[in-house]
Image (cartoon, rainbow, N blue to C red):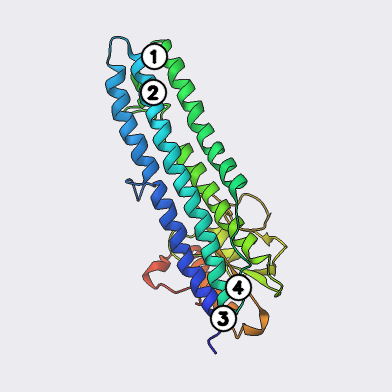
Amino acid sequence: MPNPLEKAVKSGIRMNDRIGDLFAKIGTAAHPRGNVLTDYDQARLALEAALAKENPLPAVRDVLRNMRRQLNSDVGNILNDAVLLGTDEASRQLRFYNARPRGSIRLTEQTNTAQETVMSQFDAQAAAINALVLSNADPSQIIGDDERTGVLSSGVITAAAAIWGAYLIWTAFDTTVTSQEEKFMKQAVAALDARTTDCCLRVHGQIVELEKPFHLTGTPRFADFMDWPAFHWYCRTSGVLYQAEFDDGLTDKMQEGSQFFLDAREAGRNPDQNPVDAFG
């Protein structure tokens, strides 16, 4: 019989990439064509034209209205994808242990709250832009220029969408697996590459009771104890279902892998020149 823990950890490694894909869909410096970044790029061009009008306020309000509609749709789709991602991963890992989730889950309230929170950040930007237009402020204060970031900045929105997306992934995962009669623990699985934070390297392989938090010691981290990722902004670490009877040295290998990266960084070496996988 294939080792279900090994299959769960390998799935967790793939999940690291799926979380990264979700962040790419939002938009990052490495993925500038993400939906949220594209919404901002298009709105910035439209605002530049609107601000050039003799009476810019009506045109600016039209641009912001249209932007809000598109942004709200894109953020909603991303957050719904996050819920599906979490339920799909939980169901997959349960199948490795010959367990099945009991029906579908609904996180409507959590998803709506997350979407409202992200959009409130945009609403604050829109209110500030309207005020700046009324005060005849320089357009660069709104859309930015080579020397400054304007009020219409995507950073706070992409970060909020990413953190709430991660929250919904692991809320969906947790809700799915905690309905099981079978006893599980959980294990943290980090993506081991040059972008992995000190925090996630140090928690990689840690095992705790399903209902207890992971203990975080590295940086950056939101808190010392957290039930699930995201442990910091744009965190790709995943959680997997763990049963000790199937641990035939897997955890030791995982921790050897993360220690390799920690040692390389301490010595000023590039660990990606001699990469290791999550099993060391």
User: Which sits earlier in the primary sequence, circle 3 or circle 4?
Assistant: 3
Image location of residue 28, percent across then percent down = 39, 47
Vertical arrangement, residue 41 with respect to residue 176, above or below = above
**Residue farthest along the bottom direction in this orientation:** 1
Q: Which mark is residue 137?
A: 1
User: Which sits earlier in the primary sequence, circle 3 or circle 2?
Assistant: 3
Mark 2–mark 1 contact, CB under 8 Å?
yes
Q: Residue at x 61, y 64 (%)?
A: 103
Q: Residue at x 40, y 65 (%)?
A: 270
Image location of residue 160, percent across then percent down = 51, 42
> Which label lies toward us, 3 or 2?
3
Question: On the image, numbered disc 4 is attached to which residue?
Answer: 100
Which amino acid does the dot numbered 2 rest on?
A: Ile
Image location of residue 272, percent across then percent down = 39, 67
Mark 2–mark 4 contact, CB under 8 Å?
no
User: Which sits earlier in the primary sequence, circle 1 or circle 4?
Assistant: 4
Which structural element holds mark 2?
helix
Q: Residues within 10 Å of mark 4 (few under 14, many from 20)?
A: some
* Distance (Cα) linking label 2 and label 4: 52 Å
The quadrant of the image that shows the N terminus is bottom right
Question: On the image, numbered disc 3 is attached to which residue?
Answer: 4
Question: On the image, numbered disc 2 is attached to which residue?
Answer: 142
> Which label lies toward us, 3 or 4?
4
Q: Residue at x 48, y 65 (%)?
A: 15
Which structural element holds mark 1?
loop
Mark 1–mark 4 contact, CB under 8 Å?
no
